[in-house]
Each structure stands twice: as structure tokens, then as C-alpha cells.
Image: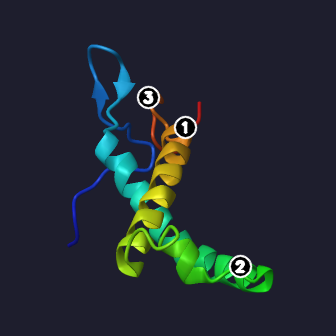
Amino acid sequence: MGQEGGDIGDRAPVDSARGEAIVTARQVAIIAAIVATLMYLPLVLVLALVLRAAGIAFATFATFGGSFGLFFGLGVWWLVAFAGAFLYASFLFQWSDKVSGWPKKR
């Protein structure tokens, strides 16, 4: 019943030539996309309130001063958030650990 799986102490797949855990940039990009999407709406709401208090129209800021449409401008701001989240995730991701999970007791 269920899936056959390993124990919590099982090792992650390793590259035999280098002895490092196999981690792809795709995994980091997926994590970054999730983080950027989750933080995007709260940051936009806070930014809209701050700009409103400062007397600046949010649409002006979101469209880069009217250079883009509102939808495209918000997409560009999401890409900026994604770039920041990608850098954050790439520095914090475990690139060279040989064990993924709890170490075994000796």
C-alpha cells in the first residue's frame, strides 16, 4: 500500500565523479518562482499604501512612469522579485551536501 520509499536516513542521489548531491538550476528556479509569487502580493499591497501616503500614484510606479501598460508593468515587477528570490535561493540551496536528511546515529 502506498509508494515504496526510503527511510529518512537514506542518502540523496550523488554524482559519483564529484561526490556531490545532484542539484539543478531548474529546482532553484522553481523555488524562486514560488517565493516570488508568495511575497509579491503582500509587498505590492504594502508598497501601494506607502506610495499613497507619499502622494505618488501606484499606477505611475507600477507602469514605470507610463512606459508600460499596467499588466505588463506588474509582470516586469514580478520578474524583478523573481530575480531577487533566485539569487536568495541559489545562495541558500544546499549545492554540495552529500546527505539530504537527518544524519544517521552512530
- Mark 2: secondary structure: helix
Q: Is residue 78 left or right of residue 88?
A: left
Q: Earlier in the sequence, mark 3 or mark 2?
A: 2
Q: Residue furthest top?
A: 17
Query: Element type at marker 3?
Result: loop
Looking at the image, which residue is at 27% across and 55% down? Answer: 5
Percent x, y of residue 79 = 42, 59
Which amino acid, by three-letter code, is at mark 2?
Leu
Quadrant (top left/top right/bottom left/bottom right) for the N terminus: bottom left
Disc 3 or disc 2, which is closer to the eye?
2
Q: Nearer the viewer, residue 36 or 57?
A: 57
Of 78 and 93, which appears nearest the observer? Answer: 78
Dot 1 crowding, Cα within 10 Å, few <14, some 14–19, many 20+: few
Q: Position of residue 4 (x, y in %)?
A: 22, 58
- Disc 1 designates what residue? 91
**Residue drawn at (71%, 79%), measured in percent from left and top?**
51
Q: Residue at x 41, y 80 (%)?
A: 70
Give the Cα distance between marks 2 and 1. 31 Å
Residue drawn at x 54%, y 37% is: 91
Q: Are marks 2 and 1 in contact (CB under 8 Å)?
A: no
Residue position marked by numbered label 2 in the rendering:
51
Q: Is residue 23 above or below residue 80?
A: above
Instruction: Read off the residue under disc 3.
Output: 98
Color scheme of the displayed model: rainbow
